Amino acid sequence: MAEDLQTLKLSREGAVVFAAISAPPMNLLGPELVRDLVSLIQAVESDATVKVLVFKSADPDYFIPHVDVTRIKAYREEAAKLTGEASIALLFHHLSASRIVSIAQIEGRVRGAGSEFVLGCDMRFAARGSAIFSQMEAAFGVIPGGGAAQHLARLMGRSRALEVLLSAQDCDADLAERYGWVNRALPADEIDGFVSTLAHRIAGFPVSGLATIKERVNAIALAPAEEFRRDSDLFGQGVQKPEAQALIRTAIARGYQDRQAELALGPLLDGLDAG
């Protein structure tokens, strides 16, 4: 099992590994978290006795709110240590294609690349009353770079995916369930037991069957790596443009990447181009 992880707290129960994200102050997806995700994925893939990987959050308010926009180059370089390419989109695609069955237990806010990370997991379960979802990249004039367009169009259909991607609005667990963003929305006091029971049930089945089922479902429903690469490139190009950088600076001045301010992100993003 991976050791010396600074941003993930691990526990193991038989063939199931639980990873709680703990990257204060608000679980931003920065180079340290990407580095630890790479190390964890490499470790579980190399251990034939691990079948299921469950991601949770140690922070009740934030699962992963989005990337650290001040360290994009650094976290991309960490992702390259798994895929050979500086792209979190391809890191997430790798997780989707892995033999490991991955489950996201979502409590707290999951926006931007945080949403794209859980979309890269095989299953997603959201806690009512705490889970909040958003793809807010349109507010900065860029496309989501981690695969959201690929996943959401397939899960939701064209119109709902466009609503989510173009509006940059928050939605709660029940709406996420209705739209297909998550498998189920569950009461907060039931989600832990449900996910644990499901993970152990899956882990009780032969690994060969699990891997083959994933492979065949992916052949139908998972976009090719080239499409994730294209979105990643478009994001990388777009976020470097002066217009996007100006919008990011305005957002940061309003409290973007501040733990308290991002509890309600929608109003903070309104009218960024107006200063």
Image (spheres, rainbow, N blue to C red):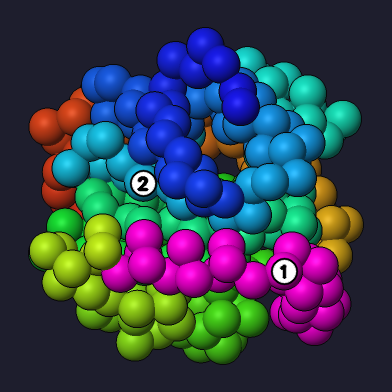
Can residue 117 be seen at all in this image of the molecule? no
Residue 239 position (above or below residue 119): above
Residue 64 position (above or below residue 111): above
Residue 183 or residue 25, whichever sits in front:
183
Magenta segment boundaries in residue numbering: 194-221
Which residue, given by chain and number where applicable, does mark 2 sit on?
56
Kind of residue at disc 2: Lys
Residue 226 screen position, x and y as percent: 87, 57
Residue 193 position (above or below residue 268): below
Residue 218 within the magenta-colored segment of the rendering: yes
Q: What residue lies at 42% left-to-right and 22% top-to-bottom?
A: 7
Q: What residue lies at 33% left-to-right and 27% top-to-bottom?
A: 22
Q: Is residue 106 left or right of residue 223?
A: left
Instruction: Name the element at disc 2.
Output: strand
Which residue, given by chain and number where applicable, does mark 1 sit on?
206
Q: Is residue 167 left or right of residue 60?
A: right
Q: What residue lies at 33% left-to-right and 56% top-to-bottom?
A: 106
How packed mark 1 is, by other alpha carbons closer than 10 Å (few <14, some 14-19, many 20 or more), is few
Residue 156 position (above or below residue 51): below
